[in-house]
Amino acid sequence: MGNYEYHDRIIGSLLPTHSSSDLYALDESELWWIGHFEFLKNHGYMMRPRYRPGWKPSYKPGILEPLFSEDGQSQDHPYVMDALRISDSYMVAMKRVKVSTGEDQVATFFSNEQHNTNPRNHCIRVLEVLSVPGDDNEKILVMPWLRQVMDPRFRTIGEAVQFFQEIIEGLQYMHENNVAHRDCASNNMGMDANLMFTRQYHPINPKKRHNWSGRALHHSRTRCAPKYYLIDFGQSRAYNPSESRPSEYALKSGGYTPPEGDAGIPCDPLATDVYILGTMLRTSFLDGDPNVSKPGVYGFEFLRPLVNDMIADDPSSRPTMAEVASRFSDLIAKLRWWKLRSRAVQKDEVLAKPFRAVYHVFWTASMMLLLKPAIPSPKNAPDVLQ
């Protein structure tokens, strides 16, 4: 079946016959998911009421009303949809990917039995791959729904160190298996925070419960350690280990273009990954990012020499991910317990600083009484992905 015929059959009948001034009306990408509701339901996945055939808004027309209604929450990414696994209400992300990009191959490679059981593998796990009926050019990857890594904020230096450890280890693991991520900025990292939350949070408004019945309360990362993952392999490349790795043109990632990208000079893609990761550490923690009003966080100057080497202009001068991991481990080994348990203070924090500092003393004492380590460890967390 041709793409146009397929589009007309799946989408055409769902399109409104009149123009709508409702800013929160269904767009064409949402209609695509509604057109596949029965297909996804038959495979065990239930989308929210907004994405079910025959949906009628529960809110009155207007600009603000949809913001306060569960079914007014639309997906930000046209190719990603949230759903609950019918068998156990586990929240998943379903992503449409073009077969031509090879994203499904990279993602499933790190989800096979050999890699899935390796604790050093921090690539998001693919639970299932669905072939799109009537369209051989696309597939749907079903994966755990992950939360943004910066939400909620890191409470301690040690909590952030756990994040650094897992992402560094994960990118090193990709490189050891001859795969370059090529877009490993913070927006392509995610956090499995299910153990932190007492009830499932909403995928679009994560401060709310999934059923919209109130606030989504959560424990700290220190008390209930999350897991961190690398996601989105749409720009990733896998290389033949028996052949020399080709140079690649660097891509803009996380709002920044590596120097080799600005110069239009192809280079080793693994060196570009190191730069992108180093830039994430600099803009998210050390210095902040004025482009998005991100203030930076106090307490991470111990990373400065390593980060400076990672973002060197000359790709050949940057350390490999194996060297980054080794140097990072040496740095962490030198940190005292009180440093790791100290507050990760936002650089724009002023008025609440003394009050939060006092509260932190009592909170730290409670975590120590519970024998929670300064660097959270998710090793004993149960596997809910089966």
Image: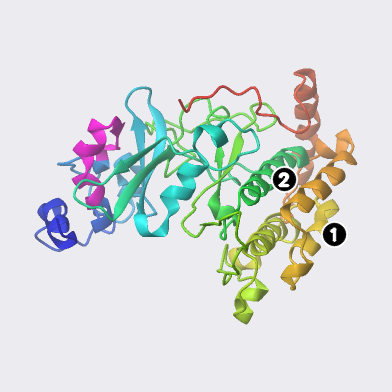
The reply to whether the magenta stretch includes residue 43 is yes
Residue for badge 1: 305
Name the residue type under label 1. Answer: Pro
Residue at the image point whose x is 15% and y is 63% from the top: 19
Residue 155, above or below 176:
above
Name the residue type under label 2. Answer: Ala
x and y percentages locating residue 294 in the rendered image? 64, 59
* Badge 1: residue crowd in 10 Å (few <14, some 14–19, many ≥20): few
In this picture, residue 304 sits left or right of residue 73 = right
Contact (CB < 8 A) between labels 2 and 1? no
Quarter occupied by the C terminus: top left
Number of numbered discs visible in the structure rendering? 2
x and y percentages locating residue 301 in the rendered image? 83, 54
Secondary element under disc 2, as helix, strand or loop, is: loop
Bounds of the magenta segment: 31-49
Residue for badge 2: 352
| Residue 1 visible, this orientation | yes
Viewer-nearest residue: 123 or 219: 123
Secondary element under disc 1, as helix, strand or loop, is: helix
